[in-house]
Amino acid sequence: MSDTNKLKVHSPYDQQLIKELPMMDGAALEKIIQTAYELFQDQSGWIAPYKRIAILEKARQLMEGKVEELTKTAAQEGGKPYKDSKVEVLRAINGVKIATEEISQLRGEQVPMGLTAASVNRLAFTIREPIGVVASISAFNHPLNLIVHQTITAFAAGCPVIIKPASTTPLSCEAFVAILKEAGVPDGWVQMVLCTNELTEKLATDKRVNFLSFIGSGKIGWYLKSKLAPGTRCALEHGGAAPVIVEQDADMEDMLPLLVKGGFYHAGQVCVSVQKVFVHEKIAKKLAQDMATAAKKLKVGDPLDEATEVGPLIRTGEVDRVEEWVKEAVESGAELLCGGKRISDTCFEPTVLFNPPHDVRVSKEEIFGPVVCVYSYTNREKAIKLANSLEYHFQAAVFTRDIDLALDTVQKLNATAVMVNDHTAFRVDWMPFGGRDASGEGLGGIPHSMHDMTREKLMVFRSKMLP
Amino acid sequence: MSDTNKLKVHSPYDQQLIKELPMMDGAALEKIIQTAYELFQDQSGWIAPYKRIAILEKARQLMEGKVEELTKTAAQEGGKPYKDSKVEVLRAINGVKIATEEISQLRGEQVPMGLTAASVNRLAFTIREPIGVVASISAFNHPLNLIVHQTITAFAAGCPVIIKPASTTPLSCEAFVAILKEAGVPDGWVQMVLCTNELTEKLATDKRVNFLSFIGSGKIGWYLKSKLAPGTRCALEHGGAAPVIVEQDADMEDMLPLLVKGGFYHAGQVCVSVQKVFVHEKIAKKLAQDMATAAKKLKVGDPLDEATEVGPLIRTGEVDRVEEWVKEAVESGAELLCGGKRISDTCFEPTVLFNPPHDVRVSKEEIFGPVVCVYSYTNREKAIKLANSLEYHFQAAVFTRDIDLALDTVQKLNATAVMVNDHTAFRVDWMPFGGRDASGEGLGGIPHSMHDMTREKLMVFRSKMLP
Amino acid sequence: MSDTNKLKVHSPYDQQLIKELPMMDGAALEKIIQTAYELFQDQSGWIAPYKRIAILEKARQLMEGKVEELTKTAAQEGGKPYKDSKVEVLRAINGVKIATEEISQLRGEQVPMGLTAASVNRLAFTIREPIGVVASISAFNHPLNLIVHQTITAFAAGCPVIIKPASTTPLSCEAFVAILKEAGVPDGWVQMVLCTNELTEKLATDKRVNFLSFIGSGKIGWYLKSKLAPGTRCALEHGGAAPVIVEQDADMEDMLPLLVKGGFYHAGQVCVSVQKVFVHEKIAKKLAQDMATAAKKLKVGDPLDEATEVGPLIRTGEVDRVEEWVKEAVESGAELLCGGKRISDTCFEPTVLFNPPHDVRVSKEEIFGPVVCVYSYTNREKAIKLANSLEYHFQAAVFTRDIDLALDTVQKLNATAVMVNDHTAFRVDWMPFGGRDASGEGLGGIPHSMHDMTREKLMVFRSKMLP
Amino acid sequence: MSDTNKLKVHSPYDQQLIKELPMMDGAALEKIIQTAYELFQDQSGWIAPYKRIAILEKARQLMEGKVEELTKTAAQEGGKPYKDSKVEVLRAINGVKIATEEISQLRGEQVPMGLTAASVNRLAFTIREPIGVVASISAFNHPLNLIVHQTITAFAAGCPVIIKPASTTPLSCEAFVAILKEAGVPDGWVQMVLCTNELTEKLATDKRVNFLSFIGSGKIGWYLKSKLAPGTRCALEHGGAAPVIVEQDADMEDMLPLLVKGGFYHAGQVCVSVQKVFVHEKIAKKLAQDMATAAKKLKVGDPLDEATEVGPLIRTGEVDRVEEWVKEAVESGAELLCGGKRISDTCFEPTVLFNPPHDVRVSKEEIFGPVVCVYSYTNREKAIKLANSLEYHFQAAVFTRDIDLALDTVQKLNATAVMVNDHTAFRVDWMPFGGRDASGEGLGGIPHSMHDMTREKLMVFRSKMLP
């Protein structure tokens, strides 16, 4: 237990206290884990697919009646601008639908027999079973949609789930869990916990937990993975430093708004934000300048204001960090084309850096702030190598009209997804999504998560009456 | 041919008699059908997958020892040049391998239950069963590989098969069936028939036949389909008039040899031969002339000569027909850039026509001869419409470096397959292959044929002890 | 045009006129076909998946508000009892949902390249496209649900569809089409036609039609298939004479209500009605008698009465036919355990026949009336042979507790689906469903129909920069 | 062993030295890892699928010429009897074939777009790429086949692989790597290492390694997993204590030889050996006694003798351990029906224990020796609970003729695979195979391993010309 038993939720924009929520102690957490565990152990109490479907359809309906309310909660606690928060809420609703539909896709298949003399007289099939208790630890940047991704998937797959929201953004989670209760989720199947980091680690590493879903910093994620109980599987979604390759034949007019959106959406606090744009030297400076011009026009401010395009960073410390990194870059030779300064304790100017050195932090680490780096390149192969050179490999992009170059770049970029003529932050909730290498483990995307939250059971019928 | 009981096989190149084979009468055909039917009716005699695999692996080995012999037989009876016939033989061997491997892919899957209250207490799976007796009627242009496609698929899928080769090219089939026998195919599972067209129709429409595989002219194919017994399924592979769209940014140097190969391979006697090339006006005439220049250099002649690039047409009547069509085109305004004349009774000069009218036969029908038509276009949408305007829709192609144009053209061309920067005759034996609309029904490609030669059986276990 | 231009819809129970609807003439039909054709030809006007989804979700909502009304319409015009009609309506609603969800499953896949030296430098994928104009000809026995199966599938798959309901039951179709219009289906995408048989044939065989979906008698279905335009694909769903094998260890108590329901549901007017029950001699007579006892208790009468269990046959002629067949069976030696007589012009007593000879019509043809035949057997292999001996092969069942016998019987019964310990009429709308051999062609079930209403397009990118 | 630079390989049967092999030092290991890493980094040097296929087909041919030699090597170093070792070698050859065939199944699929308004104008597909450097650490009990499973999969999937065989059985691995070299595997793609445990840990946890395949003890496996570099994926295959449920209606005659084979195959040194047989009280004692009678007849002895049925344990210490566990069981109340004593320093008598308490080690831990425990049960639900009660969950079995009980037991047993009327050690090399919970992570089986050794890349084409 930390020194306090209250979690204070503040607006990241103006630091006002929004709400206080009770923190859970170790005994309460233990009870929650045991509840989930016992639900899973008792097969006779599992919820039939058609009942899960009915509950989730009801939940979706309830959400559709609360779009405005959920939007405001998410925007206020998370700082993502109202317009973008509304998009998030609509995506979250769609996510519930995707999970509902995916229930019927959780199916096994025949495993052929008789392919060798030793395997005749058999008929074999797999089925998919829920994996067991899921513990989900979530992040702040999509306070509702990530919760949907990390709880609805588990419930839809037939697993009891324990959800720990980011301590900065628990209110969207709280609202969502209340909706699920109203929709008919039986007690214990979706439980929210608010607790210290110490207890969160206890949850993640408890042997009654079969699956850990973690979204957050790589440092914590890989640490937790190393501490998991034997047999606990996990999905980790960490950060990246999304690279973009821009060939000289790219359609500038089409591309510009995409890069600006991809770079400054949610003040860059997205794991697939456009961060490192490698541009052919013939157009590099021009593109960087155009981006700066566009970035300067972005309206930064109160996330509850419908006109706001860029909101605050989630904590004041983040502004300090971003400011320091930009300063380091500029001092090391980067050209500052716009931004570079804080607007307030939590808001930072959209910033475009041209040709920062490759060994400064904006080039080496995930910025997670409203900063885009544009690098001029002469040789595309070298640009691709640079784009691949970090240990993070998540989403990437290439802009070109040339089909050969597009296909080649797609093959060569080390990334889970490569967009052709789109920004790196493109995501729909049913597509595979996740980091490679240091950026994470396992694939997200609702169907993929549900797949990972189930496990195959093979049944082999042996009978002399079978061929 | 029907009034005699001997089938005389002649070389299409020099009309020499190669061999005489006995023709089958109605009683013999009846016995063959009944043999196949009884084999299928007796489940206890079905050949286990592992035994089919062993037989097919043996067959492949035997074929590998007879590449030269099979090549010469195919080249001599079918007229496809030696080099291309050898490629055909190697493909045929690979086809046996593909079919062998595909046996393990013939598998069922779970059908989910419990998605509604009415479907609880059940567990359901499908399996795939052989469809029954297969009758295959084949064509002359790939005298070995088509036989493989139409017999090995059936045998691998567990079906007894009756194969009727083209009456011009039965020798490759005969050799292949002998190989299968040596490899251990039990009596009756693969039976070759040589008979009149009348008896062939009897075979195709017999109610003991569960599946008709037909490769040949649309006229005959659609006729046979209309006469099938109730319950007989079919796959029909007819002709096309493969269109190509060439944008003005196409890579001319890369494209030229592809179009020439695609247009004059086997003297154009392939259902996916490059026939109608729609070229942007800026480069149309140049491309047509370059094609003519290349076409003139093609070595036309004896298929058994290793240097030959273009061989004879399969029958003398075909040369008459092609000549007449070209004449009609030229008289109607087409510009003859090369060729246009017969070289001998069965060889025709590789011919390039520029801008033939759209209402002459070279524009409206499948040429099936060494003639390529190049059309100049101003408006790509109209060019695509023209490319789609016939009732044949098989393979097509587009040449461009532009990714938007490539994707758009792929979407808009009405074809089973669209190649981007490749000729229309590209085929590998595992890819889906077949005509749409008037060009055929069902998909070929070895795995697809095998899929169609099996049928699904659903088994639903109901038990109160199931969830 | 027939001699009248009005379609009179009568209640099959009491022959009262319910409504008159206008019949269409040839010119009107032509316009309808042309409308559908033009919609399909204009790719730019195709309805995006997300719009189809929205429309179908709206349609489902509208249907949920009209369950009572739709139930009564269906029960009144079709004669299926109220309770069962309500189940049908709820299934129809669920069917719309299944089709909506299946839209996202219409997806292509990679076709591997580089497996041979000739296929390097390529990347290939398939996509699935709508097949084109669908013409659906429907049957009376599920006047709403079959319409859903034959129209929603097409619309969901992106095809314009023309629906011709059974002339006895057009009102449910009319109501459904109105709902679709209200839900936002754009003009021309779902068009209902009422016309003579002659015009119906014209519709089915028009070359602008790409896919015929036919549910009804085999005689008509196979005839239409033989007349299709080249290139038109079809799915045919005809009748059966569903066999059941009952082993001596079957759970009698569990089985009895299932067989009674399966045999007398909708007065046996279902293509998978339990018709021929082969029972081990030790329990055959007892089971037959128990079925007779249960059948006598069934409440036969007005379909609009909520207590009714068995309603009328669809036409008076059907009662004559069934009566004659039963008479023939009894005169040939069958033991009549219950029923056997007409109750009114359209209602027939639930009838159980014991050991009718195998050469009378109740044994050889599809009864499509409330008559179940029980046959005693000594040898199970022979019983299975008899069960397979007709040309109809649709659904079948086996009752046994023995796992070996169950699996063996599943393997040996010639049927598209075999239920273990359930009746033959079990169906959920997402499972594969369809007749084999003379019972039909193609697979129904909403996802399967949607699959068949699309076609694959392969795209092959060739590039020297690809591996 | 770590203090010396020679690895001495002894026969486990008679402790004779077979061969000495050089151990690798840290510098050599570093070079090996770096070689593999650089091969993977250089995409231009990746081996095309068709070349991998050709090499693997050649390897298979070479193996077929060395069956006798490979059998003796495996039997001598590993102690598995000659007959069973030959089966292993034939399975290994088949495994190479399975991997070869699976190359063409490594394919991506379309990810649908346009399902929401935000995802129009896009076309998306996945492809599968090799995951990177694979490090495989293998076990002694199938010295050739496990090596095939852990190296050929990687090579076939396109990954460089480093293989560390068990230090007791490196000779089969050495022979196999030599075969691969002869077959044409280019330098560096398959490298064998022999080194200390310390260096093995270094290999497993090196960040240049993308995938660890580990077969061996859970203690080591879970430890290594906790030490993996961020981003390294793994598959762990540990032990189990395979349970069997025997209902009173089981076919005793059919079952007995299966249980005896499943329990004493390779002296029980298999992770899915039949260990805990829960038998209905009516037949428990009889079955146990019959198993003891059969066990006593097993010929224990020299693995190179073709008549031997049970060979030695791999190390002398294992005999001590097994002896002690059996002793503990007997002293705690288990009835010793046969065996229980050592025959030599490495051979132990096949042993059947009846009703050992649930808290002794033969009941709680994996025995990995020739000991089977039979437990009598009254209540099947409780028997299933007991069967599930350990943390190991791998393969399991049920014997019954009753279809309801079979399906229910399959549902309730916590296992990756449940055999119905077969022993727990049934395995074919293409089926999913692996432990759940503490028994391991990830699925083995050649196709599954290859799937895990690849990773998906999504490519999204965005174009305004796409629908």
Image (cartoon, coloured by chain):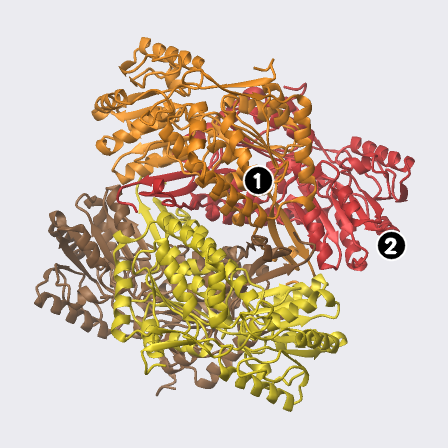
Chain colours: A brown, B orange, C red, D yellow
Residue B155 has which mark? 1
The quadrant in which residue A278 appears is bottom left
Q: Residue at x 88, y 38 (%)?
A: C341
The quadrant in which residue A84 appears is bottom left
Point out residue B247 in the picture as x, y percentages from the top left corner.
Answer: 26, 31
Point out residue D366 in the picture as x, y percentages from the top left corner.
Answer: 54, 78
B283 in relation to A429, above or below = above
C240 in relation to D262, above or below = above
Point out residue D247 in the picture as x, y percentages from the top left corner.
Answer: 71, 70
Is label 2 or label 1 in front?
1
Q: Residue at x 25, y 59 (%)?
A: A242
- Is residue C180 something that shows in the picture? no
Q: Amino acid at mark 1?
A: Phe
Q: Is residue D115 left or right of residue A246?
A: right
Question: Label 2, on which residue?
Answer: C282
In the rendered image, the quadrant that contains the N terminus of chain C is: top right
Q: Mark 2 and 1 residues: CB-CB less than 8 Å, in contact? A: no
Q: CA distance from mark 2 to mark 1?
A: 42 Å
Element carrying mark 2: helix
